[in-house]
Amino acid sequence: MYVTSCELIAFSPTGTTRTVIGAVAEGIGSPASAFDLTLPDIHAPAPGEIAVIGTPVYAGRVPETAAARLRRHVRGMGRPAVLVAVYGNRAFEDALLELRDLALELGFVPVAAAAFIGEHSFSTPQWPVAEGRPDAADREKAIAFGRSVRELLDGVSGPADLSPLEVPGNIPYRQGVQPSTICPETGTQTCVLCGECARSCPSGAITLTEDRVLTEAALCLRCFACTRVCPAGARVMLHEKILEFGRMLSTQYAQRREPEFFL
Ligand SMILES: Cc1cc2nc3c(=O)[nH]c(=O)nc-3n(C[C@H](O)[C@H](O)[C@H](O)COP(=O)(O)O)c2cc1C
């Protein structure tokens, strides 16, 4: 099967998943179009011949928002799909299995999958977790994975010729992110009311008034997109529970994990 175009479908609040699937597409080597599901305003490109679907891992699962947007906006139409889960060096648990099942439900033929490591959203300079990842070595591996996918598809007349894709994970899937009212806060003294936080929020949880930033805590995914984009350093997560979790991750998951491929 000669692959002429590639569609990069991503949910990626802090950008690591987008970077990884971009490198996978480079390895596949066909012209690629982006279908970004991160922000509420979603525009579908013309479907590519093959889809590379990437999501981060949240609590060992596909983020609920990503799954809902995939179900709402994406159709497989019998196309081959390459599945990528990006996790913060702790574990990907059932995320890849859930993504595989979701791809089947949407009408894709899953042909390959990979788990990559990205800087953990909870990482801070003081308590780093997978800081700087994906790095140059991860990028090389993502390109190599893309090349293997290409070779796999070059060797068959269509995705149906391949045996069903097996990935690790358990059913029932583990419990995902639980509802919470924890969310980042905005320092009124430092905030310049530029609106970057609101524009970066995947769930539309942040609004601006004339003199302040309001956050609807129940909508917050705790994805840290807003704290990363704030140019004034005014948007910060101060909740002790999250800070404590970040310290635990930094100490207990300091050992470097490597990407894993399933073909
Ligand atoms: C709410 C939440 C839950 C997370 N759960 C996990 C997890 O279970 N295992 C893990 O290793 N990383 C976990 N992470 C880290 C992300 O998977 C990681 O930072 C990923 O690179 C983020 O992808 P993005 O940059 O595309 O948004 C979690 C991050 C968030 C925000």
Image: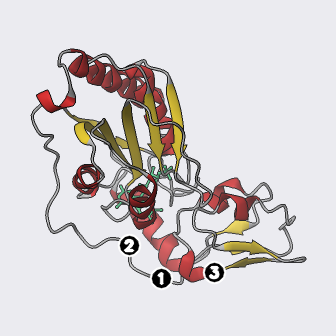
Q: Which residue is mark 3?
A: 216
- Identify the image quadrant of residue 163: top left
Quadrant position of the C terminus in the picture = top left
Residue 63 visible in the displayed image:
yes
Quadrant position of the N terminus in the picture = top left
- Identify the image quadrant of residue 65: bottom left
Q: Secondary structure at mark 2?
A: loop
Q: Which residue is mark 1?
A: 180
The residue closer to the viewer here, 17 or 8, is 8
Compared across the picture, whether 252 is left or right of 232 comes to: left
Q: Which residue is mark 2?
A: 177
Disc 2 CB within 8 Å of nearest ligand 1 atom:
yes
Distance, label 1 to label 2, CA atoms, is 9 Å
Label 1 near label 3: C-beta < 8 Å?
Answer: no
Percent position of residue 29, x then y: 42, 18
Distance, label 3 to label 2, CA atoms, is 17 Å
Compared across the picture, whether 116 is left or right of 112 comes to: right
The circle on residue 190 is: none
Distance, label 3 to label 1, CA atoms, is 11 Å
**Mark 3 vs 1, N-terminal side:** 1
**Mark 3 vs 2, N-terminal side:** 2
Residue under the point 79% across and 63% down: 195
Q: Residues within 10 Å of mark 2 (few under 14, many from 20)?
A: some
Compared across the picture, whether 261 is left or right of 127 comes to: left
Badge 3 amino acid = Glu
Compared across the picture, whether 81 is left or right of 88 comes to: left
Residue 132 visible in the displayed image:
no
Residue under the point 28% across and 24% down: 149
Badge 1 amino acid = Ser
Label 2 near label 1: C-beta < 8 Å?
Answer: yes
Asked if residue 245 is positioned above or below residue 182 in the image, the reply reads above
Badge 2 amino acid = Val
